[in-house]
Amino acid sequence: MATTPANDKPFGISQIKAYVPITLDMTKLNYDMWRELFETHCNSFGVLGHIDGSSAPTAETEKSWKEHNDLVKMWIYGTISDSILETVLKPKCTANSLWLAIENLFRDNKEARAMQLENDLRTTVIGDISIHDYCKKLKSISDLLTNVDSPITDKVLVMHLLNGLSEKYDSIINVIKHKSPFPGFIEARSMLQLEEDRLAKHHKPNPTNHLTSSAPAVLYTTSDNRSRDGNGSTNNNGGNYGGNYRGNGNYRGRGRGRNNRGRGG
């Protein structure tokens, strides 16, 4: 029967987050990662038996065993979310029973969760987000599928990546699909980011668009019209001679028409 080590090495740990820097959370489904870090930590400090059930107290070690058991429980409590804590917290439970309660919490309904995540993967599209954010979103769903024991291959992830892209990426999609060997997720992401950068350069707004050729023409025409209206108004007030003179000079046809009518009268 395994016994608790006599040394007090585990009690030197005041900040569990330095060794298990993630918080177990139902929404993130990060159980496998959390478990790996936690088991490694407990093994290195000689208390792994408290979570896997291989350690049991004896008459000689009961006091020390309970102290180590409560210490491991404190480590667990310090690395799980509040919602999980409220679900698994039970008075006077052992570290092993607490460990099993958390495992069952994440292992239950795995198939239903996997189906939902697979649907999310199929229906995710890029929309208006960047290639970086789009790839990050797909990779996150893929990791969650792994956490519920339904991992997908890298090739399947790339196909989902391509299927959710918009039409402007059609050219690079064909390149990736026909590339031999078929690129992995990281390579496909790099190719798409390069294409995104290229498209952004080709669609940069012209910095001189606000100074179009029509702008000065409109100002010139407006100014010219005002000048002509002003002249016409002044000439009408000043007398007919000035108006007839400019009419003959600038609007010769109209000027001759007036003079002809005058002579005919």
Image (cartoon, rainbow, N blue to C red):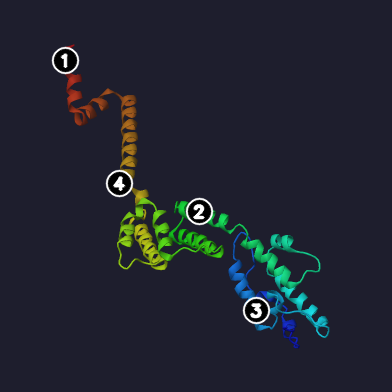
Residue 185: in sight, yes or no?
A: yes
For residue 120, the mark is: 2
Q: Is residue 35 left or right of residue 228?
A: right
Q: CA distance from mark 1 to mark 3?
A: 116 Å
**Crowd tier of the residue under label 1, counting other residues whose Cα lies within 10 Å: few below 14, some 14–19, many 20 or above:** few
**Crowd tier of the residue under label 3, counting other residues whose Cα lies within 10 Å: few below 14, some 14–19, many 20 or above:** some
**Residue situated in front as seen by the camera: 254 or 262:** 254
Where residue 147 appears, x then y in whole percent?
56, 65
* Contact flag, marks 2 and 4 (Cβ < 8 Å): no
Amino acid type, label 1: Arg
Q: Say above or below: 155 vs 56.
A: above
- Residue at the limit of the structure toward the top, as seen here: 265
**Crowd tier of the residue under label 4, counting other residues whose Cα lies within 10 Å: few below 14, some 14–19, many 20 or above:** few
Q: CA distance from mark 2 to mark 4?
A: 50 Å
Point 30% across, 64% down: residue: 179
Q: CA distance from mark 1 to mark 4?
A: 47 Å
Q: CA distance from mark 2 to mark 3?
A: 34 Å
Q: Which residue is mark 4?
A: 213
Disc 2 or 4, which lies upstream in sequence? 2
Where residue 254 appears, x then y in whole percent?
20, 24
Where residue 165 appears, x then y in whole percent?
40, 54
Mark in front: 1 vs 2: 2
Q: CA distance from mark 4 to mark 3?
A: 71 Å
Q: Which quarter of the figure is the N terminus placed in?
A: bottom right
- Residue at the limit of the structure toward the front, as seen here: 1
Disc 2 or 3, which lies upstream in sequence? 3
- Residue at the limit of the structure toward the bottom, as seen here: 7
Q: Quadrant of residue 232?
A: top left
Residue 206: in sight, yes or no?
A: no
Amino acid type, label 4: Ser
Amino acid type, label 3: His
